[in-house]
Amino acid sequence: MVADFLIRKAFAPANPDEERTPNTQTTAQQILAQLRSGRPIQYVLEEAWFDERAFYVNESVLIPRPETEELFHWIKTEQDEFPILNQILEIGTGSGILAISLKRVFPQAVVTAIDVDEKALIVAKRNAEHFGESVHFQKMNFTDPQAWNQLPKVDLLVSNPPYIPLSEKDSLSDHVRLYEPPLALFTPAEDPLLFYRLIATFGRENLLAKGRIYVEMHEDRSQQTQILFEEMGYQTIVRLDMQGKKRMLRATILS
């Protein structure tokens, strides 16, 4: 099994002539038992890599996906196109990886990151402190527009919002369905584009001149998501992920 191989590699003595200690053997067996039960290795090790840095994660936050890193690098490669970038907002920050990584790329910007889950914000704050990045974390239910007046007008808005309809829960793999936080995964079955509609609405009033929105999206609803933004007055660009799926969108307000 892959899990067995990983454990043997992780706990093998640096010097082949050395013996494993009872403590390392016990730890290895405990980790192996968790992996065999289906618990994701990132939660077992409490570590996930993003932009060549190891972030702390637990079951309160999503495990970073490759698509999220692709979205980040899309923003990063376009940084010279931002004439001014003073305010960045992340909606649904989870572990804080995007907000913290963007602060590293745009150190002059004020970065605000919100999440509805206090436990997720604890993880995000821990990561920001570990990397020495100043990010303003705030607990907020973004589905309540009355709370939006607490947020700044922004040059850059980024989000990997919940986009899986609750009706699709049973189709997910066990390691996602049983371990990752439902709040970060699921959107109402009757309104799967809820968060994109809210983000687009917020952007119409709070996106500064030449500001941009970058979001991840469900591959099966990429066209619907694009149409939603365009019908609300945005110009859009859709980008494929490494698997050739339409998973990322950039939106700017038409002049």
Image (tube, rainbow, N blue to C red):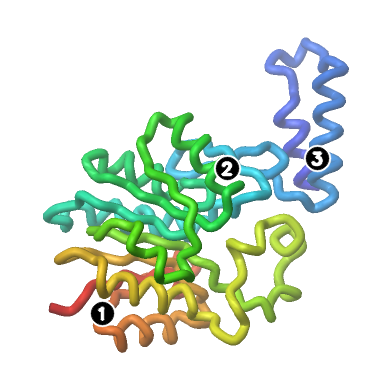
Report, in whole angstroms, how far the alpha carbon at label 2 lies from the one at label 1.
34 Å
Whether residue 250 is situated above or below residue 12 in the rendered picture: below
The residue shown at (84%, 34%) is 30
Q: Mark 3 is on which residue type?
A: Asp
In terms of depth relative to the viewer, which is nearer, 153 or 144? 144
Whether residue 112 is situated above or below residue 226 in the rendered picture: above
Q: Which residue is mark 2?
A: 48
Q: Which residue is mark 3?
A: 4
> Is 20 placed left or right of 233 in the picture?
right
Q: Position of residue 145 (x, y in %)?
A: 41, 71
Report, in whole angstroms, how far the alpha carbon at label 2 lies from the one at label 3.
19 Å
The answer to whether residue 240 is visible is: no
The residue shown at (68%, 17%) is 14
Q: Mark 1 is on which residue type?
A: Tyr
Residue furthest out toward the top:
17
SS category of the residue bearing label 1: strand
SS category of the residue bearing label 3: helix
Number of on-image labels: 3
In terms of depth relative to the viewer, which is nearer, 112 or 34? 112
> Could you classify mark 3 by the number of other residues whose Cα lies within 10 Å: few (under 14), some (14-19), or many (20 or more)?
some
Whether residue 120 is situated above or below residue 249 in the rendered picture: above
> Could you classify mark 1 by the number of other residues whose Cα lies within 10 Å: few (under 14), some (14-19), or many (20 or more)?
many
Nearest to the eye among marks 1 and 3: give it. Answer: 1
Q: Position of residue 118 (x, y in %)?
A: 57, 49
Q: Which residue is mark 1?
A: 234
Say which label, 1 or 3, has the lower sequence index. 3
